[in-house]
Amino acid sequence: EKMLETALNQLKVEQQMRKDSENKLMEFELDLVNKEHQIKSLEDQIVNIKSEKDEKISNLESTINFLQSVVIQKEKEVLNMQEKLNKNTLKVKIIIILIWTKLLKSMKLLLASLWSKGPRCARQ
């Protein structure tokens, strides 16, 4: 009878150990499923972040291209303005030379006229 009791107790202990092991296994399996969901969620976040970063990079590249084209256009405008300024500067120099030449001719004519009338006209 004592052997039977010991065997029965041993059986109860083994059943309890099996039940505890099954519970632990269920906890581990549940934990594994939760970890798999976390991994999937993190992978999705990585994909979304990568997509957002790619979009930002693409937008920045587009902005850079636009700004480069604006800079090129502005450089062309500056060159055109410099050419016009150079042409206008040359025209102004030519006009000044022409005016100076006419002024000199007029002064020569005036002096010649004054000298031809004699010293009295020059003093007046």
Image (spheres, rainbow, N blue to C red):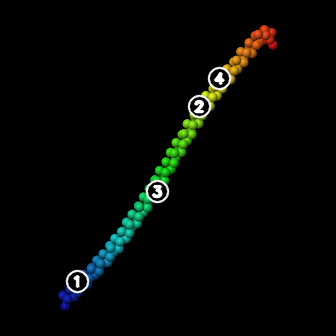
Q: Nearer the viewer, mark 2 or mark 1?
A: 2
The answer to whether 65 appears left or right of 26 in the picture is right
Q: Position of residue 116 (x, y in %)?
A: 76, 10
Q: Amino acid at mark 2?
A: Asn
One can see residue 123 in this view: no
Going from N to C along the chain, the mark reached first, 3 or 2, is 3
Q: CA distance from mark 2 to mark 4?
A: 16 Å
Q: Amino acid at mark 3?
A: Glu
Check whether the beta carbons of the residues at disc 2 and disc 1 lie within 8 A of each other: no
Between residue 63 and residue 82, name the one nearer to us: 82
- Residue marked by disc 2: 86
Going from N to C along the chain, the mark reached first, 4 or 1, is 1
Can you say which quadrant of the picture contains the C terminus? top right
User: Picture quarter containing residue 74?
Assistant: top right
**Label disc, if present, on residue 97 of the rendered structure:** 4
Going from N to C along the chain, the mark reached first, 2 or 4, is 2
Q: Nearer the viewer, mark 3 or mark 4?
A: 4
Q: CA distance from mark 4 to mark 1?
A: 126 Å
Q: CA distance from mark 3 to mark 1?
A: 66 Å
The answer to whether 19 appears left or right of 90 in the picture is left
Q: Amino acid at mark 4?
A: Ile
Going from N to C along the chain, the mark reached first, 3 or 4, is 3
Q: CA distance from mark 3 to mark 4?
A: 62 Å
Residue visible at 34% across and 71% down in the picture: 32
- Secondary structure, mark 3, is helix
Q: Position of residue 57 (x, y in %)?
A: 46, 53
- Residue marked by disc 3: 55
Q: Amino acid at mark 1?
A: Gln
The answer to whether 4 appears left or right of 85 in the picture is left
Q: Nearer the viewer, mark 4 or mark 1?
A: 4
- Residue marked by disc 1: 10
